[in-house]
């Protein structure tokens, strides 16, 4: 194991890989990352799948079968993506068993086009849970207002949920409430709470991208001093909110019944500004009971030169609040920032889903008798 990645794990941060492909599974690369790079989970999204399908011949045989069966485009997409997620779940199974279900998880996303339709999101979460049919799968549901009751309903049924597209502290509080409500409903229905796990994916770097753009428009020295600080402050205060829930009487009652905490997951942790340290959103967000999902390049950078010095979150709440207070004094609205990135996030996910549909459609349009037609 790499010393720096091990130090991160020792601080209670689970390292997850933000990528999946059939080539990665077939070649044994994922198994190698588990063995040598402390990787204990996988997240996916439609953009990742679109790139995987377009870049490799590994999907050709399955695409050919789907062509011959004349399945719909949506059915083909789900057949391809759930195959990979199921395979990754099997690769991760030993981690899942070793950690008692805490890690060894693989996430697959509901159709982002359903983000504002509660009932359709619930229906798709059920379908994906059934299609993958692995205990260590997470179903990704967006934290839109329409997504909140879907999170509750899925959790109440015993479906393990990765709540995605969380940007604001208030929305994160609503996500935690949705999870607790779902667990309370599951308890009332006699569901074994110990079998239900969840994470809430709090997006990091996109906050800085939006905030820095607004700070640059102001252009003052004070505004420049806040560049690349807002996202980390936001995430740290989200963790404070998590600690508050974890110490509540409401949570204590669920924990006594066997419930598992919904862990914070730091998402979008590769830096977008090349002038920033490439491991900044890793080293500055070290806290117990968290997950950091990273592209392989960030994992490699962390292994190579990240300085893991211990918990960098829980002693920084006052400084984090001061950053957000200063932002408001400058006339930059925090609420407008998080609203903008949530709207943009849903839009990007919808576009990436369409990209995946287009990629699979192009593959299906090839000659089913020709090997390699998936390219």
Image (spheres, rainbow, N blue to C red):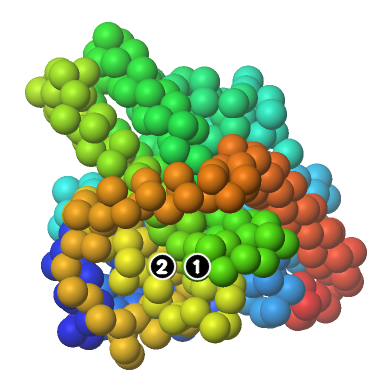
Q: From the image, tell me which residue sits under label 1.
A: 225
Residue 315 rendering spot, x and y as whole percentages: 20, 54
Number of the front mark, 1 or 2: 1
Instruction: Say if residue 182 shows up in the picture.
Output: yes
Near mark 1 (Cα within 10 A), the count class, few <14, some 14-19 or many ≥20, is few
Q: From the image, tell me which residue sits under label 2.
A: 281
- Which quarter of the figure is the C terminus placed in? bottom right
Q: Which residue shows up at 71% across the image and 49% down it?
A: 344
- Which quarter of the figure is the N terminus placed in? bottom left
Residue 193 rendering spot, x and y as whole percentages: 23, 26
Instruction: Say if residue 28 shows up in the picture.
Output: no
Q: Residue furthest left?
A: 256
Q: Which residue shows up at 65% across the image and 41% down it?
A: 336
Residue 276 shown left or right of residue 281 in the figure? right
Q: Which residue shows up at 27% across the image and 20% down it?
A: 191
Residue 203 rendering spot, x and y as whole percentages: 50, 53
Considering the numbered disc 2 on the image, is that residue within a helix, a strand or a loop?
helix
- Is 165 drawn above or below residue 34 in the view shown? above
Q: Quadrant of residue 249?
A: top left
Number of numbered discs visible in the structure rendering: 2
- Is 116 drawn above or below residue 76 in the view shown? above
- Is 190 drawn above or below residue 44 in the view shown? above
Considering the numbered disc 1 on the image, is that residue within a helix, a strand or a loop?
helix
Q: Which residue shows up at 22% across the image and 70% down it?
A: 8
Residue 221 shown left or right of residue 178 in the figure? right
> Residue 15's mark?
none
Front-most of residues 259 and 227: 227
């Amino acid at each position: 194991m790499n010393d720096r990645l091990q130090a991160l794990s020792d601080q209670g941060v689970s390292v997850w890989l933000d990528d999946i492909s059939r080539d990665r599974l077939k070649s044994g690369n994922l198994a190698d990352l588990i063995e040598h790079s402390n990787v204990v989970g996988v997240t996916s999204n439609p953009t990742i799948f679109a790139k995987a399908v377009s870049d490799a011949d590994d999907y050709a045989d399955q695409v050919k079968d789907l062509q011959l069966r004349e399945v719909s485009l949506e059915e083909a997409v789900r057949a391809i993506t759930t195959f990979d997620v199921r395979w990754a779940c099997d690769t991760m199974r030993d981690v899942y068993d070793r950690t008692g279900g805490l890690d060894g998880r693989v996430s697959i996303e509901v159709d982002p086009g359903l983000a504002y339709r509660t009932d359709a999101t619930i229906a798709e979460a059920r379908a994906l849970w059934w299609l993958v049919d692995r205990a260590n799968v997470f179903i990704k549901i967006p934290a839109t207002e329409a997504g909140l009751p879907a999170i509750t309903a899925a959790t109440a049924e015993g479906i393990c949920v990765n709540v995605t597209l969380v940007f604001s502290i208030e929305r994160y509080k609503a996500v935690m409430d949705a999870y607790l409500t779902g667990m309370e409903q599951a308890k009332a229905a006699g569901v074994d709470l110990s079998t239900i796990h969840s994470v809430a994916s709090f997006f990091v770097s996109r906050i800085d991208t939006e905030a820095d753009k607004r700070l640059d428009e102001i252009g003052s020295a004070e505004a420049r001093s806040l560049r690349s600080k807002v996202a980390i402050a936001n995430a740290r205060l989200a963790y404070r909110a998590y600690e508050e829930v974890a110490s509540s009487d409401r949570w204590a009652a669920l924990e006594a019944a066997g419930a598992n905490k919904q862990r914070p997951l730091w998402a979008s942790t590769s830096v977008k500004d090349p002038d920033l340290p490439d491991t900044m959103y890793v080293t500055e967000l070290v806290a117990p009971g968290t997950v950091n999902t990273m592209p392989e390049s960030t994992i490699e950078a962390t292994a190579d030169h990240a300085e893991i010095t211990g918990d960098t979150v829980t002693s920084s709440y006052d400084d984090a609040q001061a950053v957000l207070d200063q932002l408001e004094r400058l006339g930059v609205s925090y609420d407008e920032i998080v609203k903008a990135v949530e709207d943009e996030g849903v839009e990007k996910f919808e576009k990436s889903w369409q990209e995946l549909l287009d990629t699979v459609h192009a593959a299906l349009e090839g000659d089913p008798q020709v090997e390699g037609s998936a390219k």
